[in-house]
Amino acid sequence: YAFVVDRDGLKVVDVTMPERAKLVAGAGVPLGDARDVYLAREYAYVGAGADDLAIVDIQKPEQPRLVTKFTADGALADVNQVKVGMVNDSVYGLVADGQSGFHV
């Protein structure tokens, strides 16, 4: 599966046969301003602009489920991109916000 975003939100594409890639009907999470997606383990982290950082459970790719929208207590307002990084003591989300800058 491939996970993609557009202005409608997160969508799932079946790429079993790449030359015949197709959207998986009903598999998606509506988000009003999705801009970027990053996959880490069983989650998709979606930079969703004004919809904050959306965290989506993708353990069942054909049934993605919104877990939460993370706002960092209101500090996030225009999330463009997110990456997940691991260091020796934990796992961190690195968030680029168009209004308030870089957050860890």
Image: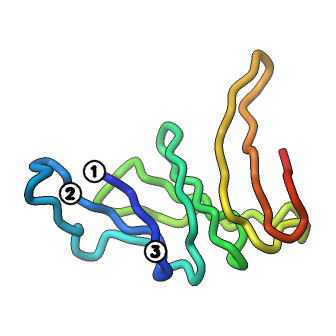
Q: Position of residue 25 (x, y in %)?
A: 22, 74
Disc number lying in front (2 or 3) = 3
Residue linked to disc 3 = 6
- Element marked by disc 1: loop
Whether residues under marks 2 and 3 lie with C-beta atoms below 8 angstroms apart, the answer is no
Q: On the picture, is 76 further left or further right than 23?
A: right
Whether residues under marks 2 and 1 lie with C-beta atoms below 8 angstroms apart, the answer is yes
Q: Residues within 10 Å of mark 2 (few under 14, many from 20)?
A: some
- Element marked by disc 2: strand
Towards the viewer: 55 or 96: 96
Residue linked to disc 2 = 14
Q: Calculate the distance from the C-alpha at mark 2 to the C-alpha at mark 3.
A: 16 Å
**Residue at the top extreme?**
88
Q: Residue at x 14, y 50 (%)?
A: 18
Q: What kind of residue is marked 3?
A: Asp
Disc number lying in front (1 or 3) = 3
Residue linked to disc 1 = 1
| Quarter of the rendering containing residue 100 | bottom right
- Element marked by disc 3: strand
